[in-house]
Image: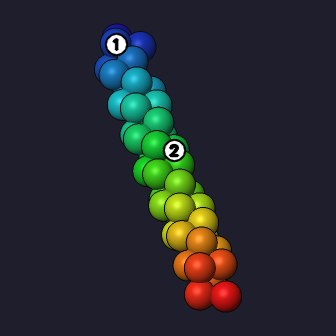
Amino acid sequence: MPLTTATPLPGRIGREKRNDRRKQESLQAMRLWKAVKQRLCERVLV
């Protein structure tokens, strides 16, 4: 009985962890993009 009640939780936790990782990756990509844009702007201004 405890196995059947415990099985859905790990899957949900794993899915949430994956979503968090995806969010973190998108945030890092946004930061990288911002940094690249800044560098490009600085080069254009200079």
Q: Quadrant of residue 5?
A: top left
User: Which callout, 1 or 2, points at the residue further toward the start of the chain?
Assistant: 1
Name the residue at 56% across, 58% down.
Answer: 28
Name the residue at 47% across, 36% down.
Answer: 18
> Where is mark 1, residue-wise?
4
Residue type, label 1: Thr
If the image is split into quadrants, where does the N terminus sit? Answer: top left
Crowd around label 1: few <14 · some 14–19 · many ≥20 (10 Å): few
Residue at mark 1 to residue at mark 2: CA–CA distance: 28 Å
Name the residue at 60% across, 72% down.
Answer: 40
> Where is mark 2, residue-wise?
21
- In the image, residue 23 sits, relative to residue 36, either above or below, namely above
Of residue 13 and residue 3, the one placed in the foreground of this image is: 13
Tell me the number on the disc at residue 13. none
Q: Is residue 37 visible?
A: yes
Q: 27 left or right of 9?
A: right
Give the percent coordinates (x, y) of residue 12: 36, 31
Residue type, label 2: Arg
Give the percent coordinates (x, y) of residue 27: 49, 59
Q: How many numbered discs sit on the rendered protein?
A: 2
Name the residue at 41% across, 13% down.
Answer: 3
Crowd around label 2: few <14 · some 14–19 · many ≥20 (10 Å): few
If the image is split into quadrants, where does the C terminus sit? Answer: bottom right
Of residue 18 and residue 35, the one placed in the foreground of this image is: 35
**Label 1: element kind:** helix
- In the image, residue 15 sits, relative to residue 23, either above or below, namely above
